[in-house]
Amino acid sequence: MSEWRVLVEENVGRFDRKEWRISDIYEVDGGREEARSIAYELAMRHQPKHPGVEADRAVYRINEDMWLTMVIGATSRFHYRVTVAELFARASTAKE
């Protein structure tokens, strides 16, 4: 059974301490098409932490499973990426 996810990656932190990382992982009950629908909505409407006040937004579809959204604030631009992904493997390192 496939396990589909929607990943949101964005810049987090402030000033010179920004880093690019996964900020959200959405688990999808259905299949790939449902994941794509959720990803599209997130590309259009997700509210990243920065900028605080959004002046404009541009959404780019990279392919059927990935979008890049640029959010323009009053003084700077930020972007985030939304990706449909299939959980391929999971390995636990916890010892029993």
Image (cartoon, helix red, strand yellow):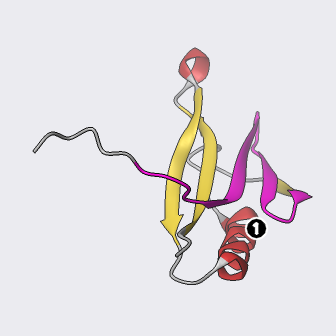
From the viewer's side, name the closer residue of 57 and 61: 61
Asked whether, in this view, residue 37 is left or right of residue 15, the answer is right
**Span colored in magenta:** 61-90
Q: Is residue 52 visible?
A: no
Residue at 61 percent across and 62 percent down: it is: 86
Q: Main secondary structure of the magenta part?
A: strand
Residue at 49 percent across and 52 percent down: it is: 89
As drawn, 69 above or below 30 = above
What residue did someone put label 1 on?
A: 44
- Determine which quarter of the picture holds residue 96: top left
Q: Looking at this view, name the residue that lies furthest to the left.
A: 96
Where does residue 36 sit, x and y in percent of width and height?
A: 73, 73
Residue at 78 percent across and 62 percent down: it is: 65
From the viewer's side, name the closer residue of 80 and 63: 63
From the viewer's side, name the closer residue of 85 and 53: 85
Asked whether, in this view, residue 1 is left or right of residue 68, the answer is left
Q: Is residue 84 magenta?
A: yes
From the viewer's side, name the closer residue of 36 and 42: 36
- Determine which quarter of the picture holds residue 14: top right
Where does residue 83 sit, x and y in percent of width and height?
A: 70, 56
Q: Looking at this view, name the residue that lies furthest to the top.
A: 16
What kind of residue is marked 1? Answer: Met
Q: Is residue 4 magenta?
A: no
Where does residue 48 sit, x and y in percent of width and height?
A: 60, 51
Residue at 66 percent across and 82 percent down: it is: 34
As drawn, 66 above or below 49 = below
Q: Residues within 10 Å of mark 1 (few under 14, many from 20)?
A: some
- Determine which quarter of the picture holds residue 33: bottom right
As drawn, 86 above or below 12 = below
Label 1: state its secondary structure: helix
Where does residue 6 sit, x and y in percent of width and height?
A: 61, 63
Q: Is residue 50 visible?
A: yes
